[in-house]
Image: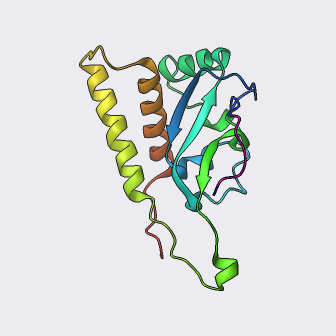
Amino acid sequence: MFTGRTEKPCCLCGHTETAHWIEIPPRAIQLLKHAEPIAWRDIEGTVSLYFCQDDWKTVRDLVLETAMSPLPRCNAGRASFVLREDFEAFLNANRAEPDQRPLEADCLDDAETVLDRYEREDPLVETRDVVEARIVIWALEDLGEPRVPGD
């Protein structure tokens, strides 16, 4: 469902000119500041977080030098994601809860592959990829095993 928003502000400071972004699995949005009202199970695809140049330096240093996740400092209201369309109110029927586990598994596999390539000093691995990979792995570790839809 398109919400009409076209700008992609920095999730830390709100600056509209962004230079870098990362993508996290939908369940990881729960770790962001002000994420409580967001129905993460209804997010389709990954969640994009954008950073201005100054904040990207901070994020990069936080992840690579101090091994800390920036997610708790990111504002969920500035994240970019797509919500599935909700016709339940019109149809008077309930749709099955989407299973986010395959998407999470893909995100985790991609992150582990990037870190493996980075450790083997692959010159094609960029710093942004390493930062994203570590954040994804830490977020999924913090959240634990996903529950099976319908449980």
Name the spot of residue 50 as percent of width and height, x first.
62, 30
Q: Return the x and y of residue 7 as percentages of the image width and height.
A: 71, 35
Tell me if residue 56 comes above or below residue 81 in the rendering.
above
- The magenta stretch spans which residues? 2-7
Give left or right: position of 34 versus 86: right
In the rendered view, does 34 fall on the left or right side of 97? right
Residue at figure coordinates x 28%, y 20% from the top left: 119
Residue 100 placed where, x, y %? 45, 59
Name which residue lies at 70% across and 78% down.
89
User: In the image, 122: left or right of 99?
Assistant: left
Residue in view at x 64 percent, y 78 percent: 88
Which quadrant of the rendered structure holds the N terminus?
bottom right
Q: Residue 77's quadrant in the figure?
A: top right
Residue 21 drawn above or below residue 44: above
Residue 90 vs residue 133, the one in the foreground: 90
Of residues 15 and 68, the one drawn nearer to the viewer in this rendering:
15
- Tell me: residue 58, above or below residue 71: above
**Quarter of the rendering containing residue 120:** top left
Q: Is residue 5 left or right of residue 107?
A: right
Residue drawn 37% across the image and 56% down it: 102
Magenta stretch prevailing secondary structure: loop
Q: Which residue lies furthest to the left in this view?
A: 120
Residue 8 belongs to the span the image colors magenta: no
Return the residue nearer the eye: 98 or 150: 98
Where's residue 60, x and y in %?
54, 19
Residue placed most toward the observer, 141 or 55: 55
Residue 97, above or below 69: below
The color scheme shown is rainbow
